[in-house]
Image (cartoon, helix red, strand yellow):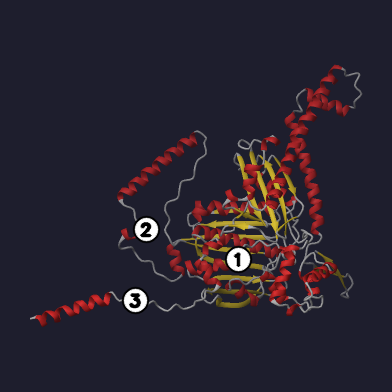
Amino acid sequence: MDSGQSSEESPIQAKKGKSKTPRKPKASTLKQKSPAEFFAENKNIAGFDNPGKSLYTTVRELVENALDSAESIAELPFVEVTIEEINKSKFNSMIGLIDRERIDEALYGDFETDKAREKRLAKEARFQEVQAKNAALGKKVKEPTSAKGIKGRGEASFYRDNGRGMPHDDIPNMFGRVLSGTKYGLKQTRGKFGLGAKMALIWSKMSTGLPIEISSSMKGQNYTSFCRLDIDIHRNIPHVHLHEKRDDKEQWHGAEIQVVIEGNWTTYRSKILHYMRQMAVITPYAQFMFRFVSDTPDKTVSIRFTRRTDVMPAVPLETNYHPSAVDLLLIKRLIGETTKQNLLQFLQHEFVNIGKSHAERLIGEMGTDFSPKTPVKSLTPQQIVRIHQLFRQAKFDDPSGDCLSPAGEYNLRLGIIKELHPDMVATYTASAQVFEGHPFIVEAGVSLGGKDVKQGLNIFRFANRIPLLFEQGADVVTRTAMKRINWNTYKINQTQDKIGVFVSIVSTKIPFKGTGKEYIGDDISEIASAVKTSIRQCCAQLKYIGDATGAIYEILKESSQLHVKKKKLMDINDEDAEILQKVSSRLITKEILSEKLAQHVEQVDYEMAMEYATQSGVREEPRENIYLQALEPQKNYTDFHSP
């Protein structure tokens, strides 16, 4: 009896004891992630937070690539962007998936109960009633809020430009290998991460699984390169489906890119259109054709941003690093990449603002272990640290802004006038300044009045000639315009007047803040001071028109009264007498005089800016040979060099 009880209890006791035994942790293994895998898992860093933002970022990246490509060959940019809305049924047919009827409606996210549907319809009816009343009173009619969309909707994005094109063999790596590209030297570039279309390809792989298609042709080629590929995210290499050469019957050069991604046009429509409008402001020498195509005709959008000028800014130049802007890692990299043999040559040719005599003085200050003929490849880690320490302590001339390419007052003014049609506009370009060893230039414009401009401050921010649309409140431009400019001093009402504030900053290094790199911090005093000065210079120009108008009109008014009283005694010509008569009879008023003076200032500024832009455009590169055929039968060619 006892033994039987013992035999029944022992398995239970053994089971309890087994459950208390701690599990052995698995041995940790060292894993590595490819760059593509890292950005796929942290896509918000590159601006791919959600389907709507991903669509916006795809548009932005590819438009900016197109501009860079055209400008690099001194070609006036023409950029065509088409976004096509793809519903679920169309997407399924593209990938060969048969639509399936729903069985359990309540299982889906867009399921609506009878009560919820009744509530929604009542809300829509009230909204329509309010809209009708507002329309009858002449008030602005709001757009209805869109219904909750179905997840998984796709957008097909198509881009075409007239740029340089891409070498046939380089296309797979240019699109299918993250952190490979042509923008990694020290120069002013539009790119923020160097990802370009690569992140759009990663998002396409993650959201739709469809490959990207690229067509490209370069000047002088008799073929077009076609490539269909996706990316192996884990290995960070391109997965090529098709790569071939086709006949170039159009004799076209540039690139066409087509990508299908999950997007949301409804939520980011205003941002995308705002981006295109601001890009037209800062690049009036470019022509943009934008289309949104939908199965619903009233949702289709087609906008052409026409070219206003054929004067382009000079191409930004690659430059060397300033000694005060380098760290230990960069010095080691430069030593590894340099073709110079000794330390003297290395200092002279790998850094800006170090001449031969200055380099010799620096070497003398480094100590007895250094000499001008010291082989640069043989420097020890301790010697490299000594060089770095001296770079941080020694005095160097500031780098010049010759390597930078601002939009120019001429282009900035034209862009503002073309898109906003203001009553008055003033622009200003500051001289090059420096922060942390990097040159930068601030350009500003202030406008009053205009089309589709709301009352108060309307702030437009640009960095390296691209619009910044997000996180505006923390930006140095916003904070300066809102808090550091006394608008009343310039007889501008900050809340009632329609004020446009445009600030463009170009530099070899834009000090972006935040993971998305969407704003410039307020903590760099050199940039904050330059922004404030530039905006104030524009305001002073606008104030000058009002002050000058008032002073001139008062003189004319007093002279007209004196002319009436002492007509015979005043010795004036017929033209002046006619002006005074018009002032007396109110045919010339203060408002008319202000308008005429503004037009005159505008014309003078326009001519001066045009002259400056023409002169600066003379140094545009690259230059191409132009051959003129002689009239005689023999073929003698004359070689001309011209931009």
Crowding near pointer 3: few (<14 within 10 Å), some, many (20+)?
few
Amino acid at circle 3: Arg
Looking at the rendered structure, the secondary structure element under dot 2 is loop
**Residue 196 disc label:** 1
For marks 2 and 1, the one nearer the N-term is 2
For marks 3 and 1, the one nearer the N-term is 3
Residue 349, percent from left and from top? 79, 71
Distance, label 2 to label 3, CA atoms, is 40 Å
Q: For the residues carrying marks 3 and 1, which lies nearer the camera in this image?
A: 3
Q: Which residue is mark 3?
A: 23
Along the horizontal axis of the image, is 576 left or right of 173? right
Asked whether 544 or 241 is in front, the reply is 544
At horizontal 33% and vertical 75% (from top left) the residue drawn is 22
Q: Is residue 627 visible?
A: no
Looking at the rendered structure, the secondary structure element under dot 3 is loop
Q: Is residue 415 visible?
A: yes
Amino acid at circle 2: Gly
Amino acid at circle 1: Gly
33 up-or-down from 292: above or below: below
